[in-house]
Image (tube, rainbow, N blue to C red):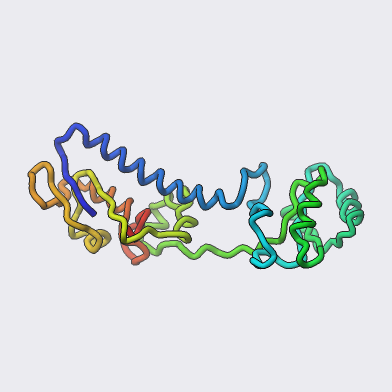
Amino acid sequence: MRTLRSLRSPLLPALVAMVLAVIFIASSMLAVGDAAAFGAPLLAGDQPRLPLQHVSVQSQAFVPGRLVVKFRPGISFIQRRSRLEAEGIALQKYLSPLDVDLVSVPVGQELTWARKLEEDPSVLYAEPDYIAHILSTKPNDTYYATYQWNMPHIGLETAWDTTTGSSDVTIAIVDTGVDLTHPDLSSKIVSGYDFVNNDSDPSDDEGHGTHVAGIAAAATNNNRGVAGVSWNS
């Protein structure tokens, strides 16, 4: 990381705030971008689901021949059964904790039947029985689970399954410097400059720059310290 030290500059607070804002916004965009792939905002009580136009039978993203049907509040059990039977659809199972029905439809026609059922005003949604996979990226850094509550809060664990940054990206920290011997940072630092003393030693005199550098790109998943937002940068 290129590190700059400017302890006396009146612009320092503004620069630090700007850098932190960029890091937070970039992180949030990763998380929001990932979430946006699941379609439009859902109604209260809905379960996250993929838009039907983005799913194909060939993708095997769902259980063949099965749909999940959620009726709107106020539709009685008998009315539900009548509507399904009228469409010639067989009920497999009722999941009471979610208040949804698992129904059988012809294999290969899952999306067609889901769209047809959603035309019924009594149906909140009908969708294939999507296959979910556990996300794998959860850092093992010492202080991650205890202190870095903000990382999962902005969806970084999901974003990290897409990217953990790139070594082609160099992040500039305009702050009080960086601890050049810090175990989470020492292997990642490139040459910097001290604009207070006008020399090439950007060592941190205050600690704040080291903190910011760690948030940006601390070495991560290394059983020590903290996790960085873009840990491969």
State the residue in front, 4 or 213.
Answer: 4
- Quadrant position of residue 138: bottom left
Provide residue 56's location: percent of width, then percent of height: 67, 62
Determine whether, in the image, residue 45 is placed left or right of residue 228: right
75 lies above or below 133? above
Q: Residue at x 87, y 55 (%)?
A: 84
Determine whether, in the image, residue 88 is placed left or right of residue 103: right
Provide residue 104's location: percent of width, then percent of height: 81, 64
Provide residue 136's location: percent of width, then percent of height: 49, 65
State the residue in front, 10 or 45.
Answer: 10
Determine whether, in the image, residue 34 is placed left or right of residue 198: right
Provide residue 181's location: percent of width, then percent of height: 18, 60
Residue furthest to the top in view is 10
Q: Residue at x 64, y 54 (%)?
A: 50
Quadrant of the rendering where the N terminus is positioned:
bottom left
Q: Residue at x 79, y 43 (%)?
A: 73
- Quadrant position of residue 128: bottom right
Q: Residue at x 23, y 47 (%)?
A: 209
State the residue in front, 147 or 56.
Answer: 56
